[in-house]
Amino acid sequence: MRLEIITIGDELLLGIRENTHLTYFGKQFARYGQIIQRNIVIRDDPNHIESYFRNSMDNSDIVITTGGLGPTTDDITRETVAQVLGLKLIHDNEAEKAIRTRFRSMGRDVTENNLRQAKKPIGAEIITNHHGTAPGLWLQCEGKIIIMLPGPPHELYPMFEKQVVPRLQSENVISENEYYLQLRTIGVGESLLENNLQHIFNRHPGKLLVSYCAHSGLVDLRLSPIDDLLSWKEIEAIGDECKQILGDDFICYGDESLSSLVLNQLSSLGKTLAIAESCTGGLLSNAFTDVPGSSKTFIGGFICYTNGTKLQMLNIPEMILQQYGAVSAECAVAMASGTAERLSTDYALSITGYAGPDGGNKENPVGTVYIGYHSPVEVRSSKIVFSGNRLMIKSRAVSAALDLLRRKLKIVN
Amino acid sequence: MRLEIITIGDELLLGIRENTHLTYFGKQFARYGQIIQRNIVIRDDPNHIESYFRNSMDNSDIVITTGGLGPTTDDITRETVAQVLGLKLIHDNEAEKAIRTRFRSMGRDVTENNLRQAKKPIGAEIITNHHGTAPGLWLQCEGKIIIMLPGPPHELYPMFEKQVVPRLQSENVISENEYYLQLRTIGVGESLLENNLQHIFNRHPGKLLVSYCAHSGLVDLRLSPIDDLLSWKEIEAIGDECKQILGDDFICYGDESLSSLVLNQLSSLGKTLAIAESCTGGLLSNAFTDVPGSSKTFIGGFICYTNGTKLQMLNIPEMILQQYGAVSAECAVAMASGTAERLSTDYALSITGYAGPDGGNKENPVGTVYIGYHSPVEVRSSKIVFSGNRLMIKSRAVSAALDLLRRKLKIVN
């Protein structure tokens, strides 16, 4: 089943808006065992839409378009697709009724432009839009399926999930079942991970789709069957085998964040946590507070961005700063313990380092980060040197700190 | 000049990674007066690369590919493109030297796989990769320009900006000048903004391209000439007219962040800043510390995520919490003043509210945020109710706090 997505909009090609539709559809189809063959992003130009839509029709079995169904003059997808397929546009009374009802509920008048949205290529079925005025369209033509959907995500997503997915399932285009297994890992790079696991994957040539995604120091590994050649049980067995080999570098199945994972573990142990950050400047704290309900476990943090604030906030002995400097194992440990003492928590993490672009020295160049760890039974620090720019160093340092805590807590998933 | 981007990678079509390359290239080319005609996202599959690359060659003058230049077996862009063009792959000694030097500096051995990256289609020129091992390639063939670039952004971006842009300028593909004017605004929504400014734009029908992008409470407005029908001077005059109408809602020309803007202003006044955050939990602090050199002005912050930490960290009178609660104007002001006093800064900001999904009450539902402001001459608070999910509320509250400080500092751009 060859599936293509055509995304229409100048603003995507001008870099003004990200193409979140692709990420959305990619995830949705992968869930049901399909991979999109191609995504084309093109301009709001009738000639472009015409020629590229024709090209997609020739190359695939299902074509989904997004955007260009609205009421304004640059919304031309409906008209252009009808023209390419040689289909007359006709008026749909049900669609008009839905548009009128929606406008009435908003207390607004229906203009001539808005009624243009009630038109459809002959033979097409209207997909009702419960969150906007532009209906979607489902059309079977030349032995292919064409689905036209509106661009705004809050209209597109519910329309796709509630109306298009069930229809695609009943047409046997996508599976009734969800279809991939994700293993979240940390500590091994993408290529080493591939090396270590390749012998497992080699046992299923042509049957197993493996993909990797590295982000902020983590690597996600996704396993899915090709053309249903492996059962879900077999996929799970392969996942378990990978997990055994990964050992402590395996974080979890699925996509739970490191911060959510450690907060849940601490919460189930009835323990509290606080942090102190220097070079990551709030990013670690933000990772914890992104998790709903985190305040039960994560009670607070100190952003001590200068030597002065380290002394004032955390009572760090001045001698440590003078003798070892703020970027040192000694300072990281003092920050963690100082935090736990100040806020009377069981656990504390700290981060101090050089995020760049300036700072650093020969012994501790830009990218050097010390992580401090304080628990009821132990105090320690760990030194890591990251590459990348300021924002990458901050983000990797945060993942490393969360991972240190995860390993110490021996979280088993 | 027809320009196409081919982005290669299963992970994009599986929804594992966002297609940030398109946003990046879109912005880069728009800066120099070009719009990308089409972006194609395709799989790591030699047959797909072959047929879609051929199709792009036939449809355009410049084809840029990203991804698939690395050392692993699924990196096949170089080989496939050479094959489509009927060009032999040859070994490049300079490229090999660069790869060997890079591995030596990392203390790693060069494998046979890595040396595959020193190959190039005959006639191609190597584009040195200063941040990774896979070099880029520049190739002129069939009267077209083909540019192959590595996928990782920290390798791709500097390679493109420092080596490809100047080359494209010298080949007269892109302008020597930047080509759009961006006005950053806050305080008015996208459609109200359009309404207020439409009468200006209406005076230049068919000559002026106007586009909007809303993010975290800000709206960026971009003005560019269509087909060179307006001079840069005319565009600037239109920009100034918009700026007059926008008044204080105009932030700046360009894309400087609010945090960078207020830090620069405080720095030029020789003033210091500290913050206290409850519901935004580190995100405001992180916005400041994303700015290189911020530690001269932003000295630190308190993440006081519970009532207990508000008392401990900031000496907030217990009566305030008992009488008004942690989410109140009184608490926001006490947090800001407590912070400024504790850390002896000139300015302080605070944020307290309900980010959801739980919490809130009838008077202050989820989304309610109080911002506290402390300066050498004034203390005040402001209440805003945001819609959206937890992460959106956090992010909008941070923009609102930064904007409050910006308005108070009367920054003129």
Image: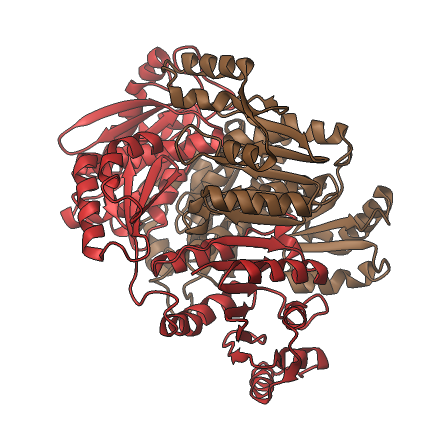
Chain colours: A red, B brown
| Tally of marks | 0
Which residue lies at the image location 39% right of the left edge and 20% below the top edge? B112
- Quarter where residue B66 is shown: top right
- The quarter of the rendered structure image containing the N terminus of chain A is bottom left
Q: Position of residue A170 (x, y in %)?
A: 36, 74
Q: Is residue B283 left or right of residue A51?
A: left
Depicted B167 relative to depicted A126: above or below: above
| The one of B348 and B223 positioned closer to us in this rendering | B223
Q: Position of residue A247 (x, y in %)?
A: 18, 35
Which residue lies at the image location 81% right of the left edge and 52% below the top edge? B241
Q: Mark yes or no: residue B271 visible.
A: no
Q: Mark yes or no: residue A340 visible.
A: yes
Depicted A235 relative to depicted B116: above or below: below
Which residue lies at the image location 50% right of the left edge and 36% below the top edge? B67
| The one of A311 and A290 positioned closer to us in this rendering | A290
| The one of A295 and A250 positioned closer to us in this rendering | A250
Q: Position of residue A68 (x, y in %)?
A: 63, 66
Q: Position of residue A141 (x, y in %)?
A: 54, 73
Q: Is residue A246 left or right of residue A171?
A: left
Q: Is residue B109 left or right of residue A99?
A: left
Depicted A353 relative to depicted B177: above or below: above
Which residue lies at the image location 50% right of the left edge and 32% below the top edge? B79
| The one of B354 and B193 positioned closer to us in this rendering | B193
- Quarter where residue A406 is shown: top left
Q: Is residue B413 left or right of residue A323?
A: right
